[in-house]
Amino acid sequence: MSVEQEERAIRCLVAKVGLDGHDRGAHVIARAFRDAGFEVVYSGLHRAPEDIVQAAVQEDVDVLGISILSGAHNTLVPKVIEGLKEYDAFEDTLILVGGIVPDDDETELKQLGVAEVFGPGTPMEETVEFIRNNVPERA
């Protein structure tokens, strides 16, 4: 990690995409990320994939954490990934998904470019450590 990166806080967007109205977990994650020293932006509820892409690009985030409990991850996450690619923001964004994701779907999401899927009950320290160890280098 470069000196510049050490000085710059890791920027995270915690995103709720689609019609999923459950955001308690997203708030818990956002607070844990802040407590870990990350800069956190929260998208709010009911965001379209395009809204999430715009926010990630405008905020120049290092990490995009998508919280989905609605089961629509196979539809919504690929749209977000495609949008990031269109803006040339995919390569330098660590994409995480949190929620209830079946194993087969998790494999598919990882093939698309999701770095990790965190299910309910994942210890916060594990998620924070994963981010610190995997956040993309900035040029």
Image: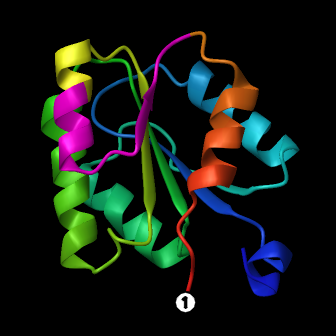
Q: Identify the residue at horizontal 28%, vertical 80% (top origin).
A: 88
Q: Which residues are magenta?
A: 107-120
Identify the element where label 1 is drawn.
loop
Residue 138 at x, y = what percent? 57, 81
Count of marks overlaid on the render: 1
Q: Identify the residue at horizontal 57%, vertical 60% (top origin).
A: 135
Residue 112, magenta (yes or no): yes
Image quadrant in which you'd find residue 130: top right
Is 92 left or right of 83, judged from the image as shown? right
Quadrant location of the N terminus? bottom right
Is 93 left or right of 124, judged from the image as shown? left
Is 51 left or right of 14, judged from the image as shown? left
**Viewer-proximal residue among 13 and 88:** 88
**Viewer-proximal residue among 80 and 116:** 116
Residue 111 at x, y = what percent? 19, 43
Q: Which residue is mark 1?
A: 139
Instruction: Please identify the residue farthest to the bottom as the structure is shown.
Output: 139
Q: Identify the residue at horizontal 28%, vertical 35% (top origin).
A: 18
Residue 116 at x, y = what percent? 42, 37
Q: Is 80 above or below relative to 31?
A: below
Residue 84, magenta (yes or no): no
**Viewer-proximal residue among 46 and 39:** 39
**Viewer-proximal residue among 30 and 117:** 117
Q: Is 27 above or below relative to 10?
A: above
Quadrant location of the C terminus? bottom right
